[in-house]
Image (spheres, helix red, strand yellow):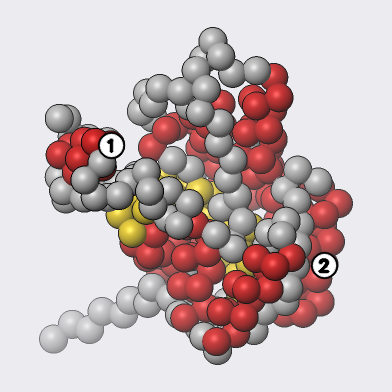
Amino acid sequence: MVEYEHTPVTVAGKRVVVIGGTSGIGEAIALGCAADGADVVATSRTESAVESTASAIEERGAETVRVTCDVTDAESLEAAREATVDALGGVDVVVASQGAISRKSVLGIDDDDWDFVTDVALDGVRKVTQAFAPAMEEGAIVNISSLAARLAMANLPAYSAAKGGVEAFTRVSAKELAPDIRVNAIAPGYVITPQNADTYAEGTEKRQKIDDRAPLGRVAEREEIVGAAIYLASDAASYVTGEVLTVDGGFADSTF
């Protein structure tokens, strides 16, 4: 019998930073990586949110450091990098999961809303990459995109443009940072988080439309994005870079 070796899908032993890791999908990824054996730093602009998530990380047996930062401020991100390196000795994985959204039409969105969304969701990815990549001898960056990058979603022009930019930036970063750092993205579909639980509650018209279109017949729980993040961050994905992994229950490629 021929024996085949394979690389396990795990981030055990890695040092992971999750930007925007104290809420929504980012928090699920931070806690999932901690439960899998990684040391994890989850950042936010809010000190209380950082404290709460850091305590949850420690409850899972992982090392962490409490870091607040603002993705629109390069110096803030650099300080977060230095605090992480000082505490953990280095960085192996960075997940850029910060988010911002404005629900206004193409003709209705103003400069302030457009700049707010793109500064956080797109330019923030650039700043995160520039701050942390120099501290990584090798490893992986995982950017969080969205189906909005490829589907026409009304009243989300800035968000859609930003996420499309994230995917393009991911491909360019993958080319330039290779071979030492792999860069990929995840495009989640409709995911229930504490922030949108009312919007996607069972029985609402929006929830029913999503359930009807998605082949799996439901929206996702945020924990269902964690496996994709761990895979892309793990050594099992050692030959994967410049890719966007869609996790949407088949929604994008289906019709009503």
Q: Residue at x 38, y 64 (%)?
A: 223
Q: Tell me residue 26's x, y (percent).
A: 53, 59
Q: Which three-letter amino acid code belongs to the residue tagged 2?
A: Glu
Q: Is residue 62 above or below residue 24?
A: below
Q: Residue at x 51, y 35 (%)?
A: 163
- Which residue, as the protein is rendered here, is positioned at the far top? 107
What is the quadrant of residue 42 in the picture? bottom right
Marking on residue 82: 2
> Could you classify mark 2 by the number of other residues whose Cα lies within 10 Å: few (under 14), some (14-19), or many (20 or more)?
some
Q: Is residue 8 above or below residue 111?
A: below
**Element on which disc 2 rests:** helix
Marking on residue 206: 1
Q: Tell me residue 111's x, y (percent).
A: 69, 19
- Classify the position of the C terminus by image quarter: top left
Q: Which three-letter amino acid code belongs to the residue tagged 1?
A: Lys
Residue 28 or 172: which is nearer the viewer? Answer: 28
Q: Is residue 139 visible?
A: no
- Classify the position of the N terminus by image quarter: bottom left
Q: CA distance from mark 1 to mark 2?
A: 43 Å
Q: Is residue 170 visible?
A: yes
Q: Tell me residue 152's x, y (percent).
A: 37, 23
